[in-house]
Image (tube, grey):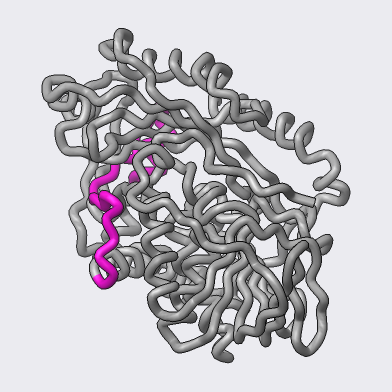
Amino acid sequence: MLQPQPHTGSYYAASVNHVTDYAPLRGEQRADVCVIGAGFSGISTALHLAERGYDVHVVEANRVGWGASGRNGGQLIGGLSGEARMAARMGPGSEDLIWEMGWAGHDIIRERVKTYDIDCDLKFGYLSVAIKQRHLRDQQKSFERMERHGFPHEYRHLSRDELAETIGTSHYIGGLLNMANGHLHPLNLCIGEARASVALGATIYEQSPVIDIEKGSKPRVITATGAVTADFVVLAGNAYHFLEPELKGHLFPVNSFIIATEPLTVEQVAQINPRDLAVCNPNFVLEYFRLSADKRLLFGGRFNHFGVESRKIRKFMIPKLHRTYPQLRNTRIDYAWGGTIGVTINRVAQLGRLTDNILYMQGYSGHGVNVTHLAGQIMADAVAGTMERLDMFAGVKPVVVPGAHLLRKPMVALGMVYYQIKDRL
């Protein structure tokens, strides 16, 4: 059985606007919908449902935003992972719909921040940077796609020299600027949406690990101290979900790690990121960075490690930071933390049904801030009886590796080695 745990020692937890303290689930409760998991997936779903008048109860093992939703790089990136596979499954004429869905999460977040006055440092501006010539070719394809769809936001190529002037490093050979993407404080967004859900009548239970789900016409979600009987159950634990046997092996838990510097000086900010852009390279074993609201550099990436020990994270990430920004060698590192994202083998997010009244959502493969908000809307549609978009995702069958849940660490380690080699080619 999972034991409740406090928030990790991240910069986000240290700078959160509101500390949640929702009571654990006790006794027998009744709801229209019970959502398991209070990260972006679960809270997005809960808020969409509450806005439509449903009585929704959210059951969380730890705290709101405890998992990847409160630990990620805070980058708001458009697009759906695995779009080519979705298009192949959906057939001719599907590109426009896939394109629209790829940006829907941005619109939802913008509207929620405005409607519910959520202070989460939302800013727009994003650079995809290139290390190799093939990255530039991929960026050209993205540029042409934006042209084809009449993209309404600023987007343009940056040369090596323009890029060096924009982000103060000569580490990259070019980039693609996209002013529709951006960055934010993910934990403050998640908690802000949770507070909005509660204000609309939703109930959230923290410190309440689920130990079983009794299936049937009215499924029952059971914890050690209570239960919720509902018309629908939505599973929203993503990489932290180990409850439902049928979903084991459908995704791999991949850890991502971040360090945060001390607040930079005005001169340092002017040198390395005067436009306050989010930056990410296109590798699988990627690196990404941005400035926080108080002008710390948050620098993240992946490496072959499964713990969250600050010392090990610092040891691996600091040399990467200094390779990109040697001018920050004397800058203090104040925070180091890690979290787990769910990555599917075919990169397509997994939305579907275990039974007619038990739905699930997981496997955003690095696009979670955006896609979870779309997924929550799709879950709410499904509860209301509109299945079209849910069925689009469910129609792309997951690649399942038998026994992956038992061997996930060595298999992820092998996968990381494979992609590190592939990134170098």
Quadrant where the C terminus is found in the figure: top right
Q: Residue at x 61, y 71 (%)?
A: 35
- Describe residue 57's horizontal placement relative to residue 279 as left or right: right
Q: Which residue is drawn at 58% across and 85% down?
A: 383
In front here: 405 or 125? 405
From the viewer's perspective, is 67 left or right of 250? left
Determine whether 118 is above or below 295 in the image: below
Q: What residue sits 73% from the left and 30% below the top? A: 414
Where residue 304 sits, quadrant-wise, is top right
119 in the magenta segment = yes
Q: In this orientation, does residue 98 appear?
A: yes
Chain part drawn in magenta = 115-140
Instruction: In the rendered view, tell whether residue 323 sits above or below residue 146.
Output: above
Residue 395 makes an appearance in the image? no
Judging depth in this view, the residue of 212 and 346 nearest the camera is 212
Q: Which of 223 and 212 is in front in this view?
A: 223
Measuring from the top left, give residue 342's x and y in whole percent: 62, 49
> Is residue 232 shown in magenta?
no
